[in-house]
Image (cartoon, rainbow, N blue to C red):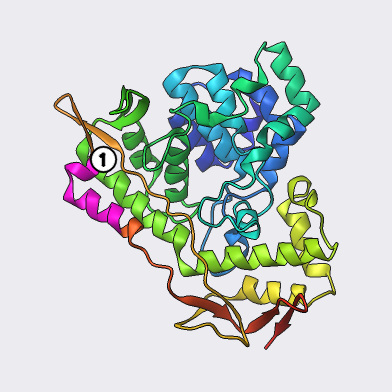
Amino acid sequence: MNKYLENLDPTIKEYFKILSDEFPDFLLDYIYTPRMQKQDLISVSCGTYYSKMFNINLWYSSLEHSVAVALIIWHFTHDKKQKLAGLFHDISTPVFKHCIDFMNGDFEQQESTEDLTEKLILESQEIMNLLKRDKIDIDSVSDYHIYPIADNDTPRLSADRLEYTLSNGLGQTKKIWNLDEIKEIYNNIEIIKNEDNELEMCFTNLKLAERFVEVMSELSICYMNDKRRFGMQFLADIMKIMSENNLISVNDLYELSEHDVIVKIKTTNDYNISECFKIWQNSKDIKTSNKMLKDKYCINVKAKRRYINPLVKIDNKIYRISDISDSAKENINKCLTYTFDRYLYMNFNFDKKKKTLVKK
């Protein structure tokens, strides 16, 4: 019996069944390795799960996202190597996910931790033993970018982008649609060759494609909005301060759970980090300004523009949806024209010189 599925939240269990009627036993041994299990302790919410600013009711882990991507790939390809590449694609995700990209200064691409994927697979004896058992070379599973169904260039539709749009709209970011609507959308996708002769997912129903883009646009604004950018930079700054002052190690970001790291934040007596974290955690809003405020924790930071311009098939002809749908084009433009000109702040100060957070 599949204990992994048994222990899932009922909504996520039903969601997985939509993605693939079959849950391949082949996948379970890899899911249960210690390295993959660490991903079950990290939320895909980039830390927003832990603040009252965000009304997130569905815990969705990095492992669940990775398993879902693997199931989508399996559904469309039935290729073991591609499926494993999808499962491993976020194996190097640290606590608070893309907040660490912000810490590394990579707030627009959010890919700074991906180079560790092969290293972490190689360091996992359990995964390497399984790959050897299954006669699979690490080069075929350590980079999901080589498989266009798994991943491709923005704004094309891939398993990764499809998955996080479906699950984020299911309640991980915002409750927008239900399982029945997800099933209808998912069942109207097929694989075709795009304008560059590469395999890509394609909608077979224009109305459903328009609905998908509408939800994608709403979620994209959520990914970029003031509260989320502020929270990600705030957590990034806390992690940087703690790392620079030996309160946490870079290795801890990949080995500890988010719960363990939050305990470290809340119990440290240094730099007033604990008090300021609690202020952010219990706040429901942030403030904005047209200029930098020197006596506040005040930031101006951009974010990655996540958007999708999928293919749609009409009367056996293939189009990018923005070329044939005014509503889809408008929704995509909302993502592309979103501005980051506001300064965002809360009533405490981050003194970079003293490396201290001081409440005002």
Residue 153 falls left or right of residue 36: left
The residue singled out by tag 1 in the image is 208
* Magenta-drawn stretch, dominant element (helix, strand or loop): helix
Q: Secondary structure at mark 1?
A: helix
Up-down relation of residue 19 to residue 60 (above or below): above
Q: Residue at x 24, y 30 (%)?
A: 204
Q: Residue furthest left?
A: 315
Q: Of 253 and 32, which appears nearest the observer?
A: 253
- Decide whether residue 159 is among the magenta residues: no
Residue 159: image quadrant is top left
| Towards the viewer: 166 or 83 | 83
Which residues are drawn in magenta? 321-333
Q: For the C terminus, which image quadrant?
A: bottom right
Task: Say which residue appears at 62% left-offset and 57% top-offset.
Answer: 99
Q: Position of residue 279 (x, y in %)?
A: 66, 77
Q: Residue at x 44, y 83 (%)?
A: 290
Question: Relative to 201, is 131 on the left or the right?
Answer: right
Residue 286 visible, this orientation:
no
**Closest to the observer: 109 or 253?**
109
Q: Is residue 184 visible?
A: yes
Locate residue 7: give its quadrant.
top right
What residue type is disc 1 on? Leu
Image coords of residue 193 (percent x, y) = 31, 23
